[in-house]
Image (tube, coloured by chain):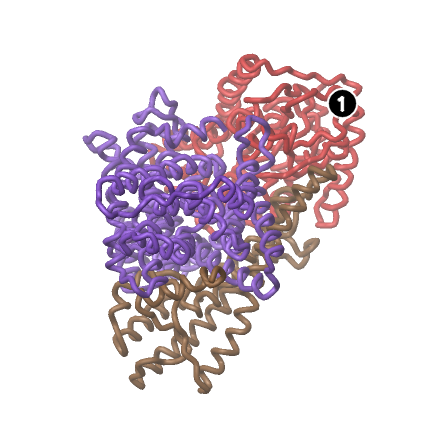
Chain colours: A red, B brown, C purple
Amino acid sequence: TEWNVSLWGKRRAFTEHVEKLAELLNEKTGGEFTLNISYGGLSNNRENLDGISIGAFEMAQFCAGYHPDKNPSITVLELPFLGVDSLELEREISMAVYNHPATQADLERWNARLLMPSPLPQYNVAGVGDAPRTIEDFAGLTVRATGGIGAALEAAGAVPTSMSATEVRQAMDSGVIRAASFAPHAHMSFGTIENADWWTTNLNPGAVNCPVVVNIDAYDSLSDAEREALDSSIDEALDYYIEYYNEQTMAAWGPALDERGIERVELAEEELTALRELAAAPAAQAWIEENNARGLPAQELYDLVIDTVAASKQ
Amino acid sequence: MAGTAQILTDDSTLSRIDQNFVKIERVLALLSGLAVFGLMLLAVFSVAGRNFFDRPVPGYVDWIEQFMPLIAFMGISFTQREGGHIRMDMLVGRLKGRALFTFEFITTFAMLILMALLMWGSWAHFQRSFDFAAPMWSRDSTMDIGLPIWPAKLLAPVAFSVLCARLVLQLYGYARAIVLGLENPVAVPLPIDVATQAALEAKTVSGHDD
Amino acid sequence: MEPIEIGIIVSLGLLFMVVIGMRVAFAAGLAGLIGLIAIFWAKKDFAGDQFIWALTVSVKTAGQVPHSKVASQALSLIPTFILIGYLAYYAGLTKALFTAAKRWIAWVPGGMAVATVFATAGFAAVSGASIATSAVFARIAIPEMLAVGYDKKFAAGVVAAGGTLASLIPPSAILVIYAIIVEQDVGKLLLAGFLPGIFSAIVYAALIIGMAMTIKGFGPAVGGFTWKERFASLPPAAPILIVVLTIVLFVYNPFGGEAWGTPTEGGAIGAFVVFLMAAYNGMRWKELRGALLETAKLSVMIFTIIWGVLIYVRFLGFADLPGAFSDWLTSLSMPPLLILVCILLAYAVLGMFMDAIGMMLLTLPVVYPAVMALNGGEMVSAADSTFGMSGPMCAIWFGILVVKMAEFCLITPPIGLNCFVVAGVREDLSVQDVFKGVTPFFIADAVTIALLVAFPSIVLWLPSLA
Ligand code: NA
Ligand code: NA
């Protein structure tokens, strides 16, 4: 069996779990089951779910926030200020939500079966000018932040602006925005750290959730040995991903900040608590109401995430 | 590369249908043009809002993405009617009469097959983004402020179906010219020799300074 | 059948459809769709009962492309750039620009022709399209050159060549299209076009001055303008500067301060400024409607090519032809620079028969990754690279070279659209006459391209600042 896999961009930390999976499958099945990974050749990143539904390819990666209405169930993982502070925890809450029957039914509409997450670190904010130290400092801060994170920062008084990621650096250099919310690797690749003065270490406003899915028909038509090889490789691929991300990307991040003399801003715990009350609670409430209307067990999904986070902190 | 063509008219039924149909097509094309104008105004609002009112247009990128299909698709049939989709006319530029219209018939028919299939494909694309049961009938939304995308996706099959109708009309025009042996049939774009065509193009951009 | 074989057969079929006169956008779309069907059907070993499945998957895959490719913020620059051109013309800025160029520059040898070159360069800064520029200046500049005794063919050649500057000097629709195909920063590419555009104009001017000094009775210098007259010519032409400044300031602030926004906004604000001028100049709804309709027609034409070709490109992705071509090219045992020169020569040949946009869209998906691989990959650092520049810089450099080649093809026989346009405006000139008159500029363009290849910093200096 050969599967086509639709990713986008280039090979990077964000895609290492799929690359590892391909390697493991090849080994375990003696070359019987291979993954043919394409970076952008098979689909647009925002149409990967469509491609799965059509059957154009068998495996794909996408991000929930690209199209909330396509996958409302997993957007719960993108709610702001969930309190996630590590890739391991991000993986844990993702798998918890992916394994919920309501989520599985939601993705079944696209003939898609959730395989594994691509855990991303929190989208902490880097910016120019005076660093925000209290909630009041967020008032009027023009920041590139989309979706739930944008809404949450707006609740704190910031002015979220949307633009494509490639325009962010220039917008920041030119004063169109003063700050941008990205994962560290994106801060580096989109150049926002080149001129930044500060970066928040513990604002942890949220992250995008990007699962890897497979076409259900293709999955069902695998031989038992192949399916076993696939299922048994996922944990290993994820372990590898997290290790790689921490060692490659996060290890480069600290020195990158130091080199440019970027200040690490740590907000006080009471500021964070206040911020969560101001921004997180209303966002969660709005999400629950909206998704109840869609017929999802929204409260249950939200509680699942919150409880998983709480359990990890015990 | 031909960009312009002549379309002859008379008072036959075919020509009357063509002339009435082009009125619809022109309105759709003007909608494209107005969308470009709207895009320009949107940027003005965005820049002004940001600089003078501290209030950028929310979801600026999302709105641009909603405008673009309007610009890209609505004029497709009008452009085909005017012979405005470019092609290489090294071969057809040298042909005349039946030989010419046979080639035109074949390539237009091939276009019709493609567009009919794409009507199906783009309709399916629309359908995947549309759900009567969902809020705002939306099963696909934009990245930033969550606008439903189905209206923009619907524009493709709509514009493509207008183009298909135009292609059927042109196929009939070519078939008629082949059967009756017409030199200068109505309702189809006739390639003009390159020099005349260039003169026409030049006129459309120069007249004002005279 | 292997996907690569399907890829080659379908590509030949596309060539055939284009040659027999099928409109390029739809020929590419159909080739792509047929190719997809072949690929999917081949996966099922061409079993008869699997054809419908292959057809369905292919049609649905292709059916996503028009909307998903067109709904892009970066592409929104194209219609606004086109709109600027049409509005600038209604704003009546051309004549003012030519008068100013004449009074300030025409005192050099070959003065009127040099003035024409710089006036077209100035108009290029508001016009995104080469053909429009040539057409406008054929009316204004040729009569003035004839009046002071220039050879008619040469005068036509100056205008045809000058028009090509519009696609290098920003705004330029073609540079935007390149940036989108290769997924590079639009703003940097637009910036990168600026110096090579000016550089081309200077090479043209140097050629004219050289000819004027060596050829007897070539065309006199036109002096005698007083400083008062010179300064009086500036205010009517000044609006062009305002537009240029607006666009430039939004992309990159040359005064060392902050830019004012993003390229997307810059294009739109530029269009708005020209719109206000045109309205002030007496443009009413009837003219605006005409301008919008023309903008729509040209935009639709370009967008249809874009999505049509991208269906074909999607098929290429499933066939993995770009990867194969890139592997083949990097395996050649030729010096990389020689390979690059061969690619550019191939563009010169192809460009004789095709238009610039179609040519770029059809070839770049295959050629661009190969060139990047030749340089050492997309993310290669300048130190490790073949051509001595980082991946993103190589993308910019190659883009300017390709666009310059495409512009070169606008003035070469047999299909040099700019020459046709000039001949069309001047009924006393045949196309052959214009091709004769433009010949000296082939040399100038060849020199320019050679220098851009030899000294990439002409291209890369400005974008490296931004
Ligand atoms: Na230009
Ligand atoms: Na040519």
Q: Residue at x 28, y 68 (%)?
A: B92
Query: Of residues C276 and C207, which is closer to you in this image?
Result: C207
Identify which residue is drawn at 42% across, 28% down: C461
Q: Quadrant location of the C terminus of chain A?
A: top right
**Residue shown at 45% from the left, 27% from the top:** C464
C168, above or below C31, in the image: above
Q: Where is residue C298 in the image (x, y as percent from the top left)?
A: 46, 58
* Residue B131 in view (yes/no): yes
Q: Find residue B49 and report its image quarter.
A: top right
Q: Residues within 10 Å of mark 1 (few under 14, many from 20)?
A: some
Amino acid type of the residue that numbered disc 1 sits on in the rendered structure: Leu
Give whichever of B191, C12 is nearer the camera: B191
Q: Name the residue under label 1.
A: A272
Q: Residue furthest left?
A: C333
For the question of whether residue A46 can be seen, the reply is: no
Q: How many marks?
A: 1
The residue lying at 68 percent from left, 44 percent from top is B57
Quarter-of-image position of residue A122: top right
